[in-house]
């Protein structure tokens, strides 16, 4: 069975990417701030979510494609955010074309709630949890810390 993918951020770049995943046969759950993009993909076979948390709960892989750092922060750490639906073994990929992750998001990922549940982090913004996690790295995000 194909891994279930969740996609958050269905703008100019996100919507076509999500549509390609759906066309390729992946079970897809989508969320966006504006409803028309969700409805468009839902009519093509995607599952419409009501929050980032619901996307995380329904997915093995969560991809975000958002316009700015505060948007990523709100989607990840906000009320009904991705971190509320995280479970062991999940992969989180932030593909937003933005500045590096905010301090709050880095703290949540490295020190806080997610780390206690086995999440790993890297400068590629690719995170995988689980005992035998595979991690793609482009460099250490926290050079003063031991490699994760």
Image: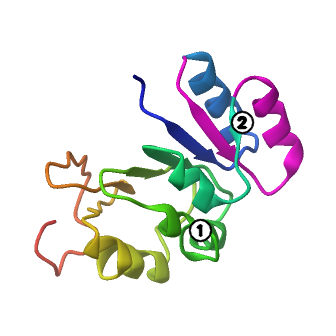
Gap in Å between the C-alphas at discs 1 and 2? Answer: 20 Å
Residue 19 picture location, percent across and down: 67, 26
Extreme-right residue of the structure = 36
Local packing at callout 2 (Cα closer than 10 Å; few below 14, some 14-19, many 20+) is many
Q: Earlier in the sequence, mark 1 or mark 2?
A: 2
Local packing at callout 1 (Cα closer than 10 Å; few below 14, some 14-19, many 20+) is many
Comparing labels 1 and 2, the label whose residue is closer to the camera? 1
As helix, strand or loop, the secondary structure at mark 1 comes to loop
Q: In which quadrant is the C terminus drawn? A: bottom left
Q: Is residue 96 or residue 26 the one in the foreground?
A: 26
Which image quarter: residue 129? bottom left
* Region in magenta: 25-45
Magenta stretch encompasses residue 71? no
Which image quarter: residue 33? bottom right
Residue picked out by circle 1: 81
Q: Is residue 55 left or right of residue 31?
A: left
Residue 82 picture location, percent across and down: 54, 63
As helix, strand or loop, the secondary structure at mark 2 comes to helix
Q: Is residue 144 left or right of residue 2?
A: left
Q: Is residue 133 left or right of residue 64?
A: left
Residue ID at (59%, 51%): 55
Residue 72's disc number:
none
Instruction: Inspect this view and state whether residue 15 appears.
Output: yes
Residue 110 picture location, percent across and down: 30, 75
Residue 139 picture location, percent across and down: 23, 58
Q: In which quadrant is the N terminus drawn? A: top left
Extreme-top residue of the structure = 24
Residue picked out by circle 2: 15
Residue 120 in the image: above or below residue 133: below
Which image quarter: residue 134? top left
Magenta stretch encompasses residue 44? yes
């Amino acid at each position: 069975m194909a891994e279930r993918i969740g996609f958050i951020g269905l703008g100019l770049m996100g919507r076509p990417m999500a549509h390609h995943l759906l066309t390729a046969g992946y079970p897809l759950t989508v969320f966006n701030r504006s409803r028309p993009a969700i409805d468009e993909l839902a009519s093509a076979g995607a599952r419409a979510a009501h929050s980032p948390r619901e996307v995380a709960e329904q997915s093995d892989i969560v991809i975000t494609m958002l316009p700015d750092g505060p948007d990523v922060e709100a989607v990840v750490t906000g009320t009904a955010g991705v971190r509320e639906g995280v479970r062991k073994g999940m992969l989180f990929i932030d593909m937003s074309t933005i500045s590096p992750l905010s301090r709050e998001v880095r703290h949540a990922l490295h020190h806080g709630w997610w780390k206690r549940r086995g999440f790993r982090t890297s400068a590629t913004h690719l995170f995988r949890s689980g005992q035998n996690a595979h991690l793609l790295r482009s460099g250490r995000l926290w050079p003063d810390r031991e490699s994760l």
